[in-house]
Amino acid sequence: MAGRRRGPLGRTLTVVRLVHPFPSLLDAAVVAVVALVAGGPPDRAAVLGLATASVQFSIGTLNDVVDAHDDAATRTGKPIPEGLVSEGVAKAMAASFGLVGLVLAASAGPVLLVVAGIGLAIGLWYDLGAAGTRWSWLPLALGVPLLPVFGWYGATASLPTSFAVLVPAAALAGSALAIANAAVDVERDVSVGSTSLAVALGPRAAGALVLLLEILVGALAVGSASGEGRAGPWLGATAATAAIPVAGALLGVLRARSGPGPREAAFELQAVGLGLLAVAWVNALNAAAA
C-alpha cells in the first residue's frame, strides 16, 4: 500500500485527514467565537466548540468510510484505501466522535443536545444518502445555519431578532460552500457515476451560481449591519470580510477549467472568508443591539 511507503509524519497526516480537520475545526472555531461574542464564558465557548468539532469529526469520518471504495480508484492520500485505518476502526471512531459530541452538547443543556442531534442527523443524511446526488448541497444549506444558532443559544439561552436575517443568509452560504466543494470533485464524480449539481451544471456554471450566492450573502450581511445604524467599526469589518468569499467564488469561476487544485483553493478561501464574515457580522449585530 502507498500509505506504508510514507514516513511516520506522512502516515500521521494521512490518518488525520480521516476526520476532515479543515472544515471541522473551522466550524468549531466559528461556534466558539460566536458564543464569546454573545457574552458566554470561555469554558462554555470551549465546550460548544469541542461539541461541534466532535460531531463534525463523526460526519467526516463516516464520509471517508462510505467513499472508501471510490477513493481507492480515484484518490491518493486517503487513510482507508491506503490501509492506514481499517473500515471497522473508522466506523468505531465515527460512532465515538458522534457520542462525545452529543454528550458535550447535553452538558450545555437539552436544547443544545437537540440542535447537535439535528446537525449530526443532517450530516449522516449527507454521508449515507445525499452525497453524490443533485441534492448534495441541501444538507449544508440546512446545517450551516445551526452553527451560529448553536453558539449564540449555547451562550445566552436565547436568540436575537437579527437571526431572522442571519439564518437564511447562512443557508445561502451553506449552499454556496456545498456547490463549490462539489465542483472540486467534478472529474472524480463523473468517473464514478455521481450526479452532483456541479456535475450537472459543469464547473464554470456551478462557479457562477456560487458567485451569485456569495454576493447575496455579502449583501445581506452588510445591509443588515448598516441598517441597524450603530454597528460602528464592525460594519467595516463585515464589508471587508464579505469580500473574501466573493473573491474565492470569483477565483472559482476564473479557474473553473484549471483542474481540482485551483477549485479547491477557491473553496477553501470561501470557507475561511465565510467563517470570518460570520464573526464580523455577529459582532456588528451585537454592537448595534448594545
Image: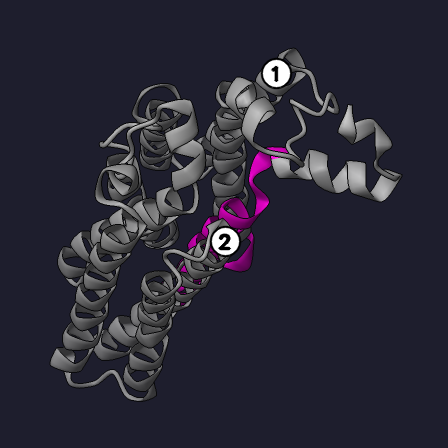
Q: Residue 19 lies in magenta, yes or no?
A: yes
The residue under label 2 is 26
| Label 2 Cα neighbours within 10 Å, binned few <14 / some 14-19 / many ≥20 | some
Residue 22 placed where, x, y %? 55, 49
Q: Amino acid at mark 2?
A: Leu
| Residue under the image location 27 percent in, 46 percent down | 202
Q: Is residue 160 visible to the viewer in this orientation of the structure?
A: no
| Residue under the image location 20 percent in, 85 percent down | 230
Q: Secondary structure at mark 2?
A: helix
Residue 196 placed where, x, y %? 29, 34
**Horizontal arrangement in the rendering, residue 163 relative to residue 204 (left or right):** left
Prevailing secondary structure of the magenta residues: helix
Q: Quadrant of the N terminus?
A: top right
Q: 21 or 3: which is nearer to us?
A: 3
Q: CA distance from mark 1 to mark 2?
A: 24 Å
Q: Secondary structure at mark 1?
A: helix
Residue 123 placed where, x, y %? 38, 30
**Horizontal arrangement in the rendering, residue 242 relative to residue 268 (left or right):** left
- Residue 92: mark in rendering: 1
Residue 18 placed where, x, y %? 61, 33
Q: Amino acid at mark 1?
A: Ala
In the displayed structure, 233 sits above or below 208; it is below
| Label 1 Cα neighbours within 10 Å, binned few <14 / some 14-19 / many ≥20 | some
Q: 6 or 150: which is nearer to us?
A: 6
User: Quarter-wise, where is residue 17 in the image?
Assistant: top right
> What color scheme is it?
one colour
In the displayed structure, 243 sits above or below 189; it is below
Q: Quadrant of the C terminus?
A: bottom left
Q: Residue 59 lies in magenta, yes or no?
A: no
Q: Which residues are magenta?
A: 18-43
| Residue under the image location 51 percent in, 22 percent down | 70
